[in-house]
Amino acid sequence: MIAIPDEFARTTIEREGEPGARWLAGLPGVVEELLGRWECVPDGPVMHGGVGVIVPVRRPSRENAVLKVSFPHPGNVHEPDAFVAWGGRGAVQLYERDDERFAMLLERAHTSTLEQVADGDEVVTVAGRLNRRLAVPAPPHLPRLRERADAWEEELLNDAAELTHALPRAVVDAAVATARELGRTQPDTLVHGDLHPRNILRAEREPWLAVDPKGYAGDPAYDGGTLLKSRALTLLEADDLGKAVDRILDVFAEAAEVDRERVRRWAQFHAVQAAFWARRHGFRVARSGPLLDGITEFADGLAELLTRRV
């Protein structure tokens, strides 16, 4: 039986409560059963992400692989569907799947991520090029981001009315306009949905491969906003925030071959969402206190800056 990492067990129970504790109790048995069914042998220490464990494995008929088992959650349902649609194009390959158990056997990549690359332009260029390669026609059964547009607008307006915040009306209005104008007319293109540097791994078959997709159909520029938000720590260190933001927008749009203005608008939308989320829920790295206050203040400032940029 595998040993569940203590940190993963703790954060799962904190987030999911009793259902998380029950799932963790049965997880070693689930992993053992899948290892037998897919003829795998553990080949290294158990790792974990935010919602799942990753077990490096070997099996005679395949290259080295990993067994991933995630906590059952709606956000994980279409991850294997995205891998099938890509067929290894810019993302790790899917070898086996068990949708009932939220389990997959995947191509093994390295543990080093794009986040560890020091050159900011390289980080954004690699992510942009992967974004372009992942933008393939979406299978018809995948969730459409355009179907969320009305809920996005309602949430933004409710948050603006109910929360104490310093965001100017024009900043909130710009995010609402993006939900209305871009959100409702998105194409049927497969997008990663959570494309940030920690979800891009070094690999053997290709230099970089994407992992942990959400599997949405939508605007390829949407993930440009996700990427920019993920560069927050780098942006905090910038001597000129506006110039640094413009550079990310320019480099990503060129590498991804998407419209820069759409990337800017989605980035502004993501920043406003983050500013409100911080006030309602906090973040994994900070639920309260000075650190959360600092992150919230930065999200506010980034949202305002992106509203003014052209």
Image (cartoon, rainbow, N blue to C red):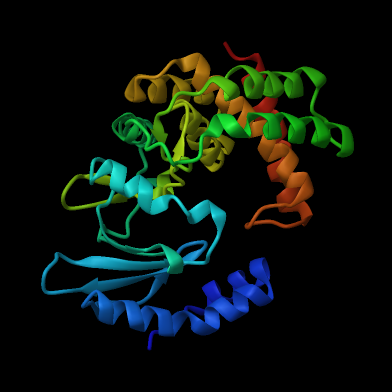
- Residue drawn 55% across the image and 42% down it: 233
- Residue drawn 72% across the image and 32% down it: 300
Q: How many marks?
A: 0
Position of the C terminus, as image quadrant, is top right
Relative to 63, say whether 75 is above or below. Answer: above
Residue 242 seen from this side = no
Residue 232 seen from this side = yes
Relative to 207, say whether 57 is above or below. Answer: below
Quadrant position of residue 171: top right
Quadrant position of residue 28: bottom left
Relative to 29, say whether 54 is above or below. Answer: above
Residue 285 placement (x, y as % from top left): 63, 57
Name the foreground residue: 34 vs 106: 34
Residue 186 placement (x, y as % from top left): 50, 23
Q: Decide if residue 249 is on the left or right side of residue 172.
A: left
- Residue drawn 11% across the image and 74% down it: 60
Position of the N terminus, as image quadrant, is bottom left
Q: Decide if residue 201 is on the left or right side of residue 298.
A: left
Name the foreground residue: 2 vs 5: 2
- Residue drawn 41% across the image and 44% down it: 197
Name the foreground residue: 187 vs 163: 187
Q: Decide if residue 225 is on the left or right side of residue 154.
A: left
